[in-house]
Image (spheres, rainbow, N blue to C red):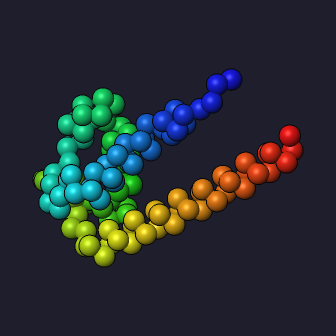
Amino acid sequence: MKGWFEEEIISIRERAYIYLKNMILEGEYKAGDRLVERELAEKMNISRTPIREALFRLESQGFVKTVPRKGVLVSQISTEEVIEVFTILSSLEVLAAKLAAQKIQRLKREV
C-alpha cells in the first residue's frame, strides 16, 4: 500500500472547517463578512453539508455568528485572540514533531 497523504486522511468536513478557519484568521474573511453556504460550497467544489457543519463548529468556537435574517457573519476577533490561537497551534506543531521523531526512533530500533 502506498503512503497516505494528509489530504486523503482528513474528511471533507474537516477540510472545510480548516479552510474557513484559516481564511478568517488570515483576514481573508473579515469581521462582519457574510458567509453564504452556497457560495462557499461552489468555491471549494463540495456540497453544502460539510460547509454547514464547519460553520456550526466555527460558531461554537466564536469565529462566526448566525444573525436572524442576515445569515452567518464573521465575528470580531481581537488581536489577542489571534495570537492565542497561533500560540496554541505552534505548540501543537512542536508536540507533533516531537512525537513523530520519537516514533521514528522507536521504529529504527525495531529494524
Q: Count the labels in the image.
A: 0
Question: Where residue 82 sits in the image (x, y, percent)?
Answer: 32, 68
Question: Where residue 9 sits in the image (x, y, percent)?
Answer: 55, 36
Residue at far bottom of view: 80
Q: Look at 17% across and 58% down and name the residue there.
A: 30
Q: Nearer the viewer, residue 100 or 63?
A: 100
Image quadrant holding the N terminus, namely: top right
Question: Where residue 23 sits in the image (x, y, percent)?
Answer: 28, 51
Say left or right for 19 vs 65: right
Q: Look at 38% across and 48% down and name the residue there.
A: 17
Q: Nearer the viewer, residue 40 or 3?
A: 3
- Rendered view: 56 above or below 12: below
Q: Nearer the viewer, residue 10 or 67?
A: 10
- Rendered view: 107 above or below 7: below
Question: Where residue 57 sits in the image (x, y, percent)?
Answer: 39, 55
Q: Look at 21% across and 52% down and name the residue there.
A: 28
Residue at far top of view: 1
Asked where in the image residue 45 lies, by quadrant, the reply is top left
Residue 73 visible in the shown view: no
Q: Look at 80% across and 51% down and name the residue there.
A: 106
Residue 104 visible in the shown view: yes
Image quadrant holding the C terminus, namely: top right
Say left or right for 28 vs 19: left
Residue at far right of view: 110
